[in-house]
Structures are given as structure tokens and as C-alpha cells.
Amino acid sequence: RRLVERGVRFVELIDVGSNSNWDSHGNMADHERLAKNVDQPMAGLIRDLKQRGMLERTLVVWTTEFGRMPTFQAGASGRDHNPSGFTAWMMGAGVNAPFEYGATDEFGYHAVEKIVHVRDLHATMLHLLGIDHNRFSVEYQGLDTKLTGVEPATPIEALFA
């Protein structure tokens, strides 16, 4: 919060460690301990931003680079990575909240409704920050590479308040 108050435009917090981090292939029950470490600080950050009138102009995103399989790995109590369905949440900066968008199959394996590609998620976040992802590009190895990649990206307008 203090960084944002002082004008820092982008702050990224990553909750990882050299061991016992969120990449729990061996023990999914460890997520309970990890959640206890971040739930109150995240709630406090959101409360502070809201109380100070900063949430309207601050985008808060909680996400990961992949989901988790709905089944245990062989011989372990953990789960493998799932690139086919995962959850992210956003608030502030013009996000329509509370709001759900998309769904996985009943098994939790594949996204099946309102599927969002990561480039569209990035385009959405950039739009909420007031940045047109199509205006910024760099030629790289003969490709016109934008902030969201080389393929077309579309912000998810249903998420905008």
C-alpha cells in the first residue's frame, strides 16, 4: 500500500520460498498453512486501499501460472499442474465485482464455459490499467510482438464495471 501511495505504478508480490511453497506436488494439505500466511495480509491490503479511496484506481490480481489437476499424483498426496483450467481473481480499478466468469467441467479438469486465454487476461488487466495493448509493440525475430503476444487478444468487457 505504501508503495502505491508513493506513486509506484506496478507492484508484484510473489509468495514462494526455496521449499514448502505453493507448488505442492507432495502435500496439498500444506496449502492450508500457506493460505493462513497470506489471507490476513491480502484482506488487510484490500481494506487499506478501500479505506483510503485507492481501490478504485488500483488493480489487485491474485493468480498463478497454472491450476492443479483434480486428482492426486500417483504415490503422493499432491496434485500435478493443470494448464487447462484454473482460477484467478481481480478487484478494484473498474472490475465488475462480485462477478464470476467462466467454468470448468464438473471434474475440474478443462475450462468449458467462457474460456479465457492468458493473452485475453493480460489484455483485460492492461485495459483496466488504462493501457491499450495494441498500441505497444516491438519487432522481434520478424514478428510484431505486442504486450499480449503476436496473436490477437481481446479484453473481457463483461468484467468491466
Image (cartoon, rainbow, N blue to C red):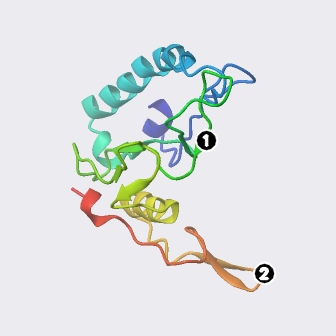
Q: Which residue lies most toward the right here? A: 141
Tell me whether the residue at label 2 lies in contact with that at label 1, contact meaning CB atoms closer than 8 angstroms.
no
At label 2, which amino acid type do we have?
Gln
Which residue does the numbered mark 2 point to in the structure image? 141
Identify the amino acid type marked 1: His
Q: Nearer the viewer, residue 126 or 27?
A: 27
**Picture coordinates of residue 101 (x, y %)?**
29, 53
Element class at badge 1:
strand
Q: Position of residue 16 (x, y in %)?
A: 65, 28
Q: Which residue occupies the foreground of this view, 23 or 160?
A: 23
State the residue at coordinates (33%, 61%). Answer: 114
Tell me what residue is drawn at x 57 percent, y 29 percent: 72
Quarter of the N terminus within the rendering: top left
Front residue of this view, candidates 29 and 63: 29
Residue at the disc numbered 1: 81
- The number of numbered discs placed on residues in the rendered structure image is 2
- In the rendering, at what x and y percent does residue 76 appear? 66, 22
